[in-house]
């Protein structure tokens, strides 16, 4: 591997991580691997960082204006740096409310604060799956005030207690210098005669999402008919490709290294990492067809001390312009469909929720996975041992 490749992998490993104490409590509270899947992949370094492409706010509704402060908890690192530019700074300027930043969206801490009436957070960024688990365990969240939220935030990105604010994708990626013709989807991934070479897919444990949907698409199921997932059929299809898997990856840096080393020229990967590798000049490409769209959301803890400001902040940051500003800085999708009109085509083409790309993909169904993940892990592990 060249020094350039090693440097790229080092950069891709330098991602936003859950603080160690939060991670331990998270796993303890939500049951190991499943908890990590709820959080979603970490954000990599800026693949756009195009501040010139960020649209400006002309006016905002009076209902978003106020005074005082709002405590916002995020993952830190480059993701928070971009949120600050896209959301926090204009919110303070236009709405008159100071954003107090905190790092480490720890659901165990949120739960403990609510239980002891010591809530100090107003808004926290957590995966939609975590929201489901918190709802199952008690009354820990405030309902989102959708009267303040723009209509462009469609039902795909709304839930009673969570408002999605960033979308990312787990999808097929391949090297462009291996085959004469380009693969186009999951059928080609399973066709090792036409597209020979190693493969890599995520393992089911350690918080990863096994490619059951992709397996079903390869087996002839239409993308829109993949849920509810036929687990046995999907596992049977994965069994067919198992001999070609050079590694079941456990973290994003692994699939990137396999791809860049050409040890596995066909993998599943996270869209932001592939964009970063392409920007470095590596011969890699992604496939939107049959990709999986996942979301992170804003949640408001029950008893948030600045509840009104929390509702205003979530509405502001989900607005079409705010979402477009963030997508101009990082290759992660907006959750307001009206954001597309504020972004140039050379940015839209890389976003999972851009209309043309989103139409080809399959949204991750958090409730199904929350209900069925234990069975998936059990049957996946049986396949691995067979």
Image (tube, grey):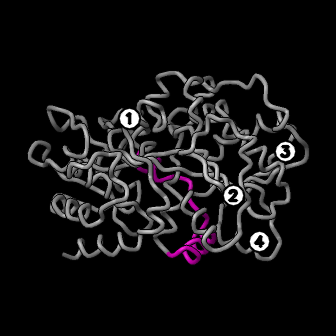
Label 4 to label 3: alpha-carbon separation: 22 Å
Residue 338 at what x, y percent from top left? 59, 29
Q: Which residue is mark 3?
A: 98
Label 1 to label 2: alpha-carbon separation: 30 Å
Magenta segment's dominant SS is helix
Examine the image and state in which quarter residue 327 appears: top right
Disc sitting over residue 103 in the figure: 2
Label 2 to label 3: alpha-carbon separation: 16 Å
Left or right: residue 316 versus residue 372 is right
Residue displayed at 63% across by 67% down: 135
Mark 2 or 3: in front is 3
Question: Marks 4 and 2: CB-CB under 8 Å?
Answer: no
Residue displayed at 20% across by 59% down: 237
For the C terminus, the quadrant is bottom left
Q: Which residue is mark 1?
A: 278
Label 4 to label 1: alpha-carbon separation: 43 Å
**In this picture, is 296 found above or below 284?**
below
Residue displayed at 83% across by 37% down: 63
Label 1 to label 3: alpha-carbon separation: 38 Å
Mark 4 or 2: in front is 4
Helix, strand or loop under label 4: helix
Residue displayed at 66% across by 57% down: 161
Helix, strand or loop under label 1: helix
Mark 4 or 1: in front is 4
Label 2: few (<14), some (14–19) or many (≥20) C-alpha neighbours in 10 Å: some
């Amino acid at each position: 591997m060249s020094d350039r490749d090693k440097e790229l992998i080092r950069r891709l490993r330098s991602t936003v991580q859950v603080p160690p104490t939060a991670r331990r409590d998270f796993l303890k509270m939500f049951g190991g691997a499943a908890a990590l899947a709820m959080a979603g992949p970490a954000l990599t370094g800026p693949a756009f960082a195009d501040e010139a492409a960020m649209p400006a706010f002309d006016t905002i509704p009076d209902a978003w204006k106020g005074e005082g402060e709002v405590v916002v908890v995020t993952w830190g690192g480059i993701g928070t740096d971009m949120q600050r530019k896209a959301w926090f700074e204009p919110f303070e300027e236009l709405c008159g409310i100071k954003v107090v930043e905190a790092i480490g969206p720890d659901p165990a801490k949120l739960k403990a604060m609510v239980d002891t009436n010591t809530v100090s957070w107003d808004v926290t960024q957590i995966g939609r799956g975590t929201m489901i688990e918190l709802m199952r365990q008690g009354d820990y969240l405030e309902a989102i005030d959708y009267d303040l939220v723009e209509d462009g935030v469609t039902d795909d990105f709304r839930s009673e207690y969570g408002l999605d604010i960033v979308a990312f994708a787990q999808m097929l990626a391949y090297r462009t210098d291996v085959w004469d013709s380009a693969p186009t989807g999951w059928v080609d991934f399973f066709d090792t005669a036409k597209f020979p070479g190693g493969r890599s897919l995520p393992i089911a444990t350690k918080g990863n999402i096994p490619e059951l949907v992709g397996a079903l698409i390869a087996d002839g199921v239409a993308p829109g008919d993949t849920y509810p997932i036929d687990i046995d059929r999907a596992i049977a299809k994965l069994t067919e490709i198992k001999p070609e898997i050079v590694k079941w990856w456990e973290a994003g840096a692994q699939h990137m290294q396999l791809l860049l080393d050409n040890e596995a020229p066909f993998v599943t990967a996270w869209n932001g990492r592939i964009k970063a590798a392409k920007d470095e000049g590596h011969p890699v490409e992604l496939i939107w067809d049959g990709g999986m769209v996942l979301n992170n959301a804003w949640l408001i803890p029950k008893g948030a001390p600045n509840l009104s400001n929390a509702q205003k902040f979530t509405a502001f940051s989900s607005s079409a312009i705010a979402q477009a500003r963030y997508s101009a800085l990082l290759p992660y999708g907006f959750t307001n469909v009206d954001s597309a009109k504020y972004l140039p085509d050379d940015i839209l083409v890389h976003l999972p929720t851009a209309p043309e790309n989103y139409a080809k993909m399959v949204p991750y169904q958090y409730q199904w996975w929350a209900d069925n993940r234990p069975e998936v892990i059990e049957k996946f592990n049986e396949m691995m041992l067979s």
